[in-house]
Image (tube, rainbow, N blue to C red):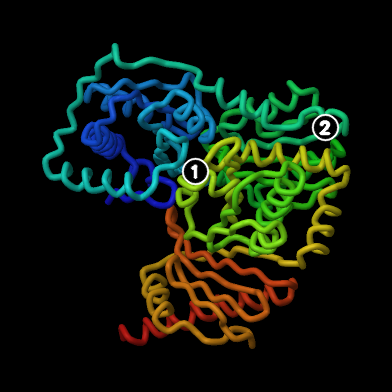
C-alpha cells in the first residue's frame, strides 16, 4: 500500500519501493497536476542511494508520456537545493528521489510545491486517491517523449542563497577551522566547497558517494558522528558540521568533540537570528521540539506556533511571513529569508556564523542560553513498532495517566501521539514514526536525572499498555 508520511513516500527497495510502484505514483502525480490545470515543468532529482538516479529517469519517462516538461538534474542534489530550484524556476512541482536519513535499503519520493515547500496533505492525499483509483486497471505502459526532457545543474539559485545569506566576512575574521561530514550524501561538494570558496579552513570526511553510506543510516546521530568527532580532535577544529543523506538535516560537534543536541542547536540559532539579525516573524516548532523555543518567543514578544510532527505544517506560514523560522527536533530548521523548507546546510552555516560573531565556543553559548532562559535537556528514544504496540498506543490515548513521575499532568494532547506536559515544565511524547516502523519517545526536563526518569516512566507506560492488550487478546 502506497502512503505518504510526514516527508513523502518511503519503502524498502524491491519490496514496497519498486519500479512498477514508482511508475504508478508518477502516473498519479501527472494526472493530479493536469487535473489541477498545472502545465509548468516538473523538476526531478535524486540522492546518492542505490537506484535513485534510475528511479528519477523512470519518473521523467512517465511525466513526459503525459505531455509534461521534465527537467532532470545533472547530478544528485540536496533536497533543499531542489526546493530552491522549483521556486526559482516557477515549476509546477519538484520530485526528489530520496529516503533522507533512512537505512540504505530504503528509497522514497519527496514532493516540493511551486513555493519551495514540501507538499502538504492536500496534495499527497489527492495523489494517494489517484493511486487507489489507478491500481485495478494500471497498464504500466509509457512512451516517453524525449523532446520534453531536458537536463540542468539546478544549483544556481541555491548556491547564491547560501553565499548571500551568511556573514562570510565575520567568519573569515574569526579564523575558524571547520570539519565537515556529509555522511556520503548529497551535501558533499556543496557544504565543503562553499566553506573553502570563502577561505574557511575546512577538513572533510566521508566526502565521496556511497549508496550504502558506510553501512549505516545516513543520520546525524552521536554514534554515526564518531568519525567527525575524531576529525575535530585531530584538526583542533572550532566546529564539526554534518548533514544527513539528502542534506535537509544537520549535526553539530563543538570544539570539545561533543555532540550538540538538535534541540539545543535549534534554540541557539533561533535566539541568534532574533537577537543579532533582527529576523521578522514568529517561531514555529513541532509538538516534539524543545520548549526553549517558547521561552525565547516570550522574551522577544514573538508568536510561537505549535504543530504536529512534519515540517510541511510550516510551509504556508514561512511563505506568508507569519513565521520567520521554524524547526523540528529531528534537526530540521528552515528560515523564511532563505527557504521555506528544512535546510541542513544553511542551518550548519548559521551555526558557524553565530560562533564567529559571538566570539565564544558553543559550550559557553549554551551556558549563556540556559542562564537567560533556564535549562531544558531533551532526549529521543526509538523502540520497535509492532502491531501490539500500535494497539497499546491507541489504548493509552484513551486512558492517559493524570500523573507521571510524581508530577501532575497539566496538558494532554492526542493530536499526534500521546503528549503529556507536567507542572514542572517537563513533558513526554509517545508516537509512532511516520516513515519507518519505530515507536518514538520524546522527553524534556530541567535536569538529567529528571529526564532519565521521564523516559523510564514512558517506557513503563508503553509496556503496561502492551501487556493489557495481550491480556485482552488472551
Which is in the foreground here, disc 1 or disc 2? 1
Position of the C terminus by quadrant:
bottom left
Seen as rendered, the residue at the extreme left is 137
Q: Residue at x 48, y 58 (%)?
A: 309
Q: Label 2: few (<14), some or many (≥20) within 10 Å?
A: some
Seen as rendered, the residue at the extreme front is 301
Nearest the viewer among 434 and 102 is 434
Label 1 SS: helix
Q: Residue at x 67, y 58 (%)?
A: 301
Q: Label 1: few (<14), some or many (≥20) within 10 Å?
A: few
- Residue that mark 1 sits on: 320
Q: Which corner quadrant of the image does residue 234 belong to? A: top right
Could you tell me residue 79's position as x and y percent? 51, 35
231 over 122 or under it: above or below: above
Label 2 SS: helix
175 over 437 or under it: above or below: above
- Residue 134 is left or right of residue 176, and the answer is left
253 over 48 or under it: above or below: below
Q: Residue at x 76, y 32 (%)?
A: 167
**Residue 20 visible in the shown view:** no
Q: In the drawing, what numbered circle is on residue 184? A: none
Nearer the N terminus, badge 1 or badge 2? 2
- Residue 38 is left or right of residue 197, and the answer is left
Could you tell me residue 60's position as x and y percent? 32, 24
Q: In the drawing, what numbered circle is on residue 170? A: 2
Amino acid at each position: 500500500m502506497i502512503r505518504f508520511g510526514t516527508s513523502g513516500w518511503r519503502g524498502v527497495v524491491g519490496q514496497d519501493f519498486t519500479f512498477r510502484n514508482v511508475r504508478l505514483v508518477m502516473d498519479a502525480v501527472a494526472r493530479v497536476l493536469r487535473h489541477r490545470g498545472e502545465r509548468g515543468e516538473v523538476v526531478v532529482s535524486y540522492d546518492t542511494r542505490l537506484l535513485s538516479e534510475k528511479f528519477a529517469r523512470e519518473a521523467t519517462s512517465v511525466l513526459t508520456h503525459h505531455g509534461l516538461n521534465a527537467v532532470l538534474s545533472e547530478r544528485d542534489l540536496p533536497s533543499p537545493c531542489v526546493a530552491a530550484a522549483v521556486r526559482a524556476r516557477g515549476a509546477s512541482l519538484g520530485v526528489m528521489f530520496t529516503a533522507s536519513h533512512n537505512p540504505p535499503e530504503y528509497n522514497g519520493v519527496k514532493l516540493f510545491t511551486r513555493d519551495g515547500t514540501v507538499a502538504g496533505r492536500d496534495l499527497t492525499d489527492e495523489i494517494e486517491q489517484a493511486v487507489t483509483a489507478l491500481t485495478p486497471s494500471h497498464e504500466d505502459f509509457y512512451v516517453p517523449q524525449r523532446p520534453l526532457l531536458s537536463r540542468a545543474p539546478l544549483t544556481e539559485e541555491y548556491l547564491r542563497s547560501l553565499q548571500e545569506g551568511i556573514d562570510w566576512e565575520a567568519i573569515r575574521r574569526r579564523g575558524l577551522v571547520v570539519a565537515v561530514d556529509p555522511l556520503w550524501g548529497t551535501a558533499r561538494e556543496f557544504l565543503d566547497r562553499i566553506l573553502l570558496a570563502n577561505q574557511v579552513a575546512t577538513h572533510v570526511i566521508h566526502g565521496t558517494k556511497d549508496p550504502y553510506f558506510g553501512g549505516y543510516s545516513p543520520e546525524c546521530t552521536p554514534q554515526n558522528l564518531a568519525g567527525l568527532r575524531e576529525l575535530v580532535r585531530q584538526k583542533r577544529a572550532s566546529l564539526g558540521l554534518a548533514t544527513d543523506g539528502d542534506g535537509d538535516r544537520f549535526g553539530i560537534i563543538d570544539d570539545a568533540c561533543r555532540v550538540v543536541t538538535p534541540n539545543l542547536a535549534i534554540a541557539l540559532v533561533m535566539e541568534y537570528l532574533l537577537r543579532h539579525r533582527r529576523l521578522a516573524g514568529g517561531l514555529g516548532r513541532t509538538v516534539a521540539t524543545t520548549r526553549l523555543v517558547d521561552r525565547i518567543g516570550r522574551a522577544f514578544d514573538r508568536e510561537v506556533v505549535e504543530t504536529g510532527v512534519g515540517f510541511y505544517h510550516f510551509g504556508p506560514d514561512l511563505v506568508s511571513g507569519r513565521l520567520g523560522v521554524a524547526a523540528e527536533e529531528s534537526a530540521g530548521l528552515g528560515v523564511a529569508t532563505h527557504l521555506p523548507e528544512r535546510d541542513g546546510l544553511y542551518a550548519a552555516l548559521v551555526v558557524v556564523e553565530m560562533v564567529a560573531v559571538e566570539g565564544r565556543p558553543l559550550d559557553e553559548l549554551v551556558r549563556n542560553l540556559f542562564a537567560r532562559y533556564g535549562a531544558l535537556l531533551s532526549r529521543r528514544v526509538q523502540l520497535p513498532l509492532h502491531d501490539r504496540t500500535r494497539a497499546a498506543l491507541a489504548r493509552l490515548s484513551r486512558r492517559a495517566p493524570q500523573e507521571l513521575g510524581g508530577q501532575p499532568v497539566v496538558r494532554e494532547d492526542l493530536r499526534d501521539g500521546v503528549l503529556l506536559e507536567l507542572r514542572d515544565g517537563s513533558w513526554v511524547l509517545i508516537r509512532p514514526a511516520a516513515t519507518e516502523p519505530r515507536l518514538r519517545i520524546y522527553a524534556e526536563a530541567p535536569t538529567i536525572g529528571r529526564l532519565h526518569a521521564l523516559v523510564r516512566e514512558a517506557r513503563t507506560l508503553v509496556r503496561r499498555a502492551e501487556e493489557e492488550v495481550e491480556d485482552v487478546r488472551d
